[in-house]
Amino acid sequence: MTNTLNPAAGGAPVADNAVLAEKAARVIPGGVNSPVRAFGSVGGTPRFLTGGRGAIVTDVEGNEYVDLIGAWGPALLGHAVPEVVDAVQRAAARGFGFGASVPEEAELAEAIIERVLEAERVRLVSTGTEATMTAIRIARGHTGRPLIIKFAGHYHGHSDGLLAAAGSGLATFGLPGSAGVTEATAAQTLVLDYNDLPALEEAFARHEGQIAAVITESAAANMGVLPPEPGFTEGLLRLAHANGALVITDEVLTGFRAGPGGYWGLEREAVQGGAAGAGAGADAGAGAGADAGGLRPDLFTFGKVIGGGLPIAAVAGRAELMNLLAPLGPVYQGGTLSGNPLAVTAGLTTLRAADAAAYERLTFAADTLAGEVSGALAEAGVAHRVQRAGTLMSVLFGDFDDAPRTYDDVLGQNVAQHRAFFHAMLDGGVHLPPSPFETWFVSAAHDEAILSRIAEALPSAARAAARA
Ligand code: PLP
């Protein structure tokens, strides 16, 4: 067998996306190691990337694209950020991991706590899936109750109990849930409509004393971006706590991306009735106000940005709950790769570099892009909605009389228009998420020059959508 990528190993280098896609499909199910990377809903050939710098990625054929996937979230500052690369290289030279603690683990935990003071203790894991799985185990361990409530269209990773109506990955492929999940496991997750407090109240009444936790994306971003309606988070916290259940706020995607303190950082003051006095100025939303009001999520999950592109995620929350984890308490959780020094270094350096100026650049990029996409689609007569939550944005194709509130509201999108738009943008040098249910990820490296490259591609993509 020849090695197609390494001429030194005897094969000629292959610089053809289609050939590599065929090769991958022969040895990897669907040719991808995570379903959303496949071009399942848009068709065509996925691009095989050789690298990225700032807001630009390059494929094996030498084509450059403006990247709006952002590694599905981690690339907050752009790709191959020199100070992050330097720090990781220095850490790598010291060794890849020792199965013993390294000093930087506590520093990363502190950096998270500085941004979300309600997160009094932090346990590092390797993926968002592990983080939500662990949060649920803590909730069950604390309450002694079996049931979990999640909202339709929210994605919390691929653990068995959380795969029902789980948003983008499943929606892209038209799947209601996953085969291989037992009925007994599925029955322990109640799936409710997002933004529906009466349904939540009814579920608590019907399953009195049985619900351990409600898990929610702090702003839904795996069915397009759907922020909670005003009053929803407050109502959810009140109802859950009145019924003895915990609230797990999943900030794996939104954490330190929607804003410096995650989406909870943007919502805290409104939820706590303005009593919290969240920080002012450039740091607004980060950290401040944790003790006021008392209304707060019990557990948080983080991922993506906190690893800066390497595998780190975290579960965090009130000390009393977090200290249930082994070795202090009876809830077991562990991991060979947890707190890996390279990943911790990448995350810590990223968070330290994500200062007020970086969030200003992210806001500018998201605002500018949202305006330009909307303008181009309107000009071409394409019905759409641009959805926002802090610096997060997504584009829904179709007629929406009102702001969508639930998963059902977004399922009827015009997929054909998205497909045509996606391919025209790709031809125009912009790498968009290959699904209409995904967030578009800008970075602090999406400056005016990059944004004008996107703007140039937009009119013909909008016309392609109009023709579809
Ligand atoms: N939670 C949310 C909100 C996510 O968006 C994701 C991944 O996209 C996860 C959890 C799972 O994270 P991971 O893919 O690292 O397992």
Image: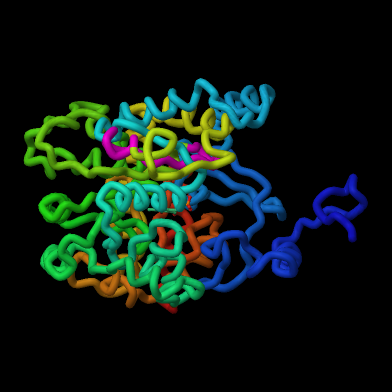
Quarter in which the C terminus is drawn: bottom left
Residue 15: x, y in percent?
A: 76, 56
Magenta residues (range): 307-323
Q: Give the total of numbered labels.
A: 0
In magenta segment, residue 317: yes
In magenta segment, residue 269: no
Asked if residue 446 shows in the view, the reply is no
Q: Is residue 369 above or below residue 165?
A: above
Could you say which quadrant of the image residue 97 lies in? top right
- What residue occupies the far right of the structure in this picture? 10
Quarter in which the N terminus is drawn: bottom right
Residue 460: x, y in percent?
A: 46, 65
Q: Is residue 223 above or below residue 95?
A: below
Residue 406: x, y in percent?
A: 24, 68
Residue 297: x, y in percent?
A: 22, 44
Q: Is residue 104 above or below residue 448?
A: above
**Which residue is at a point 38% across and 60% down the rendered structure image?**
155
Between 51 and 100, the residue placed more toward the observer is 100
Between 238 and 262, the residue placed more toward the observer is 238
Between 332 and 60, the residue placed more toward the observer is 332
Asked if residue 372 shows in the view, the reply is yes
**Which residue is at a point 16% across and 57% down the rendered structure image?**
229
Q: What sort of colour scheme is used for the picture?
A: rainbow
Could you say which quadrant of the image residue 212 lies in? bottom left
Q: Is residue 291 above or below residue 431?
A: above
**Which residue is at a point 44% across and 77% down the rendered structure image?**
174
Q: Give the side of residue 206 with respect to residue 408, left or right.
A: left
Between 63 and 360, the residue placed more toward the observer is 360
**Which residue is at a point 89% across and 58% down the rendered structure image?**
2
